[in-house]
Image (spheres, rainbow, N blue to C red):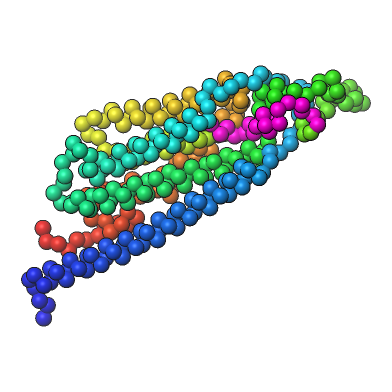
């Protein structure tokens, strides 16, 4: 005959503790696996970035889109990396602190202990951060593969290449006239700075556009999915518009600086946006369903039925 009273409550509590330990061990294993996957992607990216050389392309003398002057970056890449990385991470931390009711001005909910709220905050923080970094690793990898394997010449290529135009034979005589000769831009065609020349072979897709689009679209979607503001409802669109403007200004500056054509920027923006949407809607679809107040066994599981009496 089942025994009711304090002893049964103790057994239930112990069972819940054991279940929580089991779920914690599963979470740690998942965290390790997730981290290993991200590290592998960054290692592949490092091999592509440092060991792979851009493809040597041909050009013809009628290609007027590679004769623009070289200009310094209006938006340096370090600034894109800075706001594109720190911006989403700062908002991610603040949003999850707010969701876990851990900010100083928030009242503690009666049904969640401080330990439970802190545990769920760190679970949500790791999930959001790992998603963001996973997408970032995919984005930089695919962007660099495109740059190296396509090798499209930047609009300022001829300015940094500095070839001897007197030795360039632009045309070939044909039966009915002349046609433009394809000219190899590999050594010894260029006489300029080798570092600038190699960089000028990486036009498509735009790295500034892909990185800023990925990070800012991720931020826009994350804010939409995880930030709940009833009294200050216009703060959310303000954050989202500011993120869009940052990516938009960064992308368009690449055209005015003659570092990219419009098609390079559009290609980069589409790549970054696609990865951000795939990460937040497919890989991270749980972001839209998880609520701190519900009695989840873990972040990736549906709420469990609680055995405690109200």
Residue occupying image coordinates x 45% and y 53%: 35
Residue occupying image coordinates x 59% and y 34%: 205
Q: Which residues are magenta?
A: 188-208
Camera-side residue of 16 and 2? 16
List the single residue furthest toward the right. 175
Residue occupying image coordinates x 41% and y 48%: 130
List the single residue furthest toward the bottom. 1
The reply, left or right, for residue 177 in relation to residue 38 is right
Residue occupying image coordinates x 60% and y 40%: 144
Task: Please say whether residue 117 is visible from this viewpoint.
Answer: yes
Image quadrant where residue 154 sits: top right
Q: How many marks?
A: 0
Q: With respect to residue 260, does 26 lie above or below? A: below
- Magenta stretch: includes residue 207: yes
The reply, left or right, for residue 103 in relation to residue 272 is left
Image quadrant where residue 89 sits: top left
Residue 107 % position (x, y): 15, 41
Task: Please say whether residue 269 is visible from this viewpoint.
Answer: no
């Amino acid at each position: 005959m089942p025994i009711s009273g304090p002893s049964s409550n103790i057994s239930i509590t112990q069972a819940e503790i054991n279940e929580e330990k089991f779920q914690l061990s599963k979470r740690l294993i998942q965290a390790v696996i997730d981290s290993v996957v991200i590290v592998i992607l960054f290692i592949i990216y490092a091999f592509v970035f440092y060991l792979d050389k851009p493809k040597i392309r041909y050009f013809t003398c009628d290609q007027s889109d590679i004769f623009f002057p070289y200009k310094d970056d209006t938006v340096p890449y370090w600034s894109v990396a800075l706001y594109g990385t720190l911006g989403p991470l700062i908002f991610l931390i603040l949003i999850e602190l707010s969701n876990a009711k851990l900010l100083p001005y928030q009242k503690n909910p009666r049904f969640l202990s401080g330990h439970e709220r802190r545990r769920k905050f760190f679970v949500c923080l790791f999930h959001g951060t790992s998603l963001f970094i996973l997408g970032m690793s995919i984005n930089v990898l695919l962007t660099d593969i495109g740059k190296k394997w396509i090798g499209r010449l930047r609009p300022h290529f001829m300015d940094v290449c500095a070839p001897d135009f007197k030795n360039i034979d632009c045309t070939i005589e044909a039966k009915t006239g002349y046609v433009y000769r394809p000219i190899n831009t590999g050594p010894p065609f260029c006489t300029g700075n080798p570092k600038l020349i190699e960089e000028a072979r990486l036009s498509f897709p735009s790295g500034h556009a892909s990185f800023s689009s990925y990070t800012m679209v991720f931020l826009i979607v994350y804010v939409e999915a995880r930030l709940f503001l009833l009294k200050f409802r216009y703060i959310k669109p303000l954050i989202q518009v500011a993120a869009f403007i940052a990516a938009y200004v960064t992308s368009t500056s690449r055209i005015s600086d003659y570092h990219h054509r419009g098609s390079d920027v559009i290609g980069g923006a589409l790549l970054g946006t696609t990865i951000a949407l795939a990460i937040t809607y497919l890989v991270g679809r749980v972001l839209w369903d998880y609520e701190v107040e519900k009695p989840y066994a873990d972040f990736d599981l549906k709420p469990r039925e609680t055995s405690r009496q109200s």
